[in-house]
Amino acid sequence: MDELDRLDDAIAAKAFRRLVRHLRHRHDAENIDLMGLSGFCRNCLGDWIHEADPSIAKGDARRIVYGMEQSAWKAKYQSEATPEQLARMEASLKKNEGRDDDLDEALDESFPASDPPAMTEPGR
């Protein structure tokens, strides 16, 4: 078992919240740059929240990550992407290809039928 899978859910949740708060603070780290470097961005985090709990609408999940409506964040902080940024993002996304199946399998293994209370009782 991967060490990540043995990490306590409460600790993982604290780390996730710290990551999201860091991204809220560092609005200068634009999504296009995050995508270019890591292949994921704020939208991805919001989408992953939605995928983890489909009862949370995608827009609501993204608002959780942005700390405001996504459209308000874009209007306030997002600049026009340069051709170089777009090229970096495209190259980075190619590195993600084939990872979804591996990631989905890892997630399935880390969320057995007997989910911990943190999963079945949100807010706990």
Image (cartoon, helix red, strand yellow):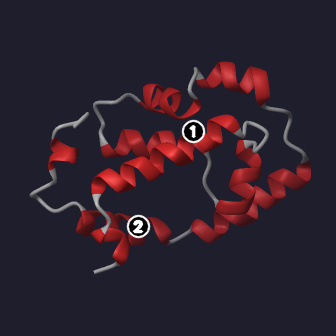
**Identity of the amino acid at label 2?**
Leu
Considering the numbered disc 2 on the image, is that residue within a helix, a strand or a loop?
Answer: helix
Q: Nearer the viewer, mark 1 or mark 2?
A: 1
Residue 94 falls left or right of residue 88: left
Residue 9: quarter of image = bottom left
Give the vertical position of 86 relative to 112 (above or below): above
**Identity of the amino acid at label 1?**
Arg
Residue placed most toward the observer, 51 or 63: 63
Q: Position of residue 81 (x, y in %)?
A: 85, 41
Q: Position of residue 12 (x, y in %)?
A: 38, 55
Give the vertical position of 101 relative to 12 (above or below): below
Residue 120 falls left or right of residue 34: left
- In the displayed image of the protein, which residue is found farthest to the bottom? 1
Give the vertical position of 19 relative to 64 (above or below): below
Residue 26: quarter of image = top right
Q: Position of residue 99 (x, y in %)?
A: 49, 70
What number of labels is visible? 2
Q: Position of residue 114 (x, y in %)?
A: 9, 57
- In the displayed image of the protein, which residue is found farthest to the left? 114
Query: Measuring 43% from the left and 46% from the top, which residue is drawn there?
Result: 48
Residue 23: quarter of image = top right
Query: Measuring 16% from the left and 43% from the top, which residue is drawn there?
Result: 120
Considering the numbered disc 1 on the image, is that residue within a helix, a strand or a loop?
Answer: helix
Residue 39 falls left or right of residue 20: right
Tell me the quarter of the image containing the N terminus.
bottom left
Q: Earlier in the sequence, mark 1 or mark 2?
A: 1
Residue 120: give its label.
none
Query: Measuring 52% from the left and 46% from the top, which residue is drawn there?
Result: 18
Residue 21: give its label.
1
Q: Which residue is mark 2?
A: 103
Q: CA distance from mark 1 to mark 2?
A: 24 Å
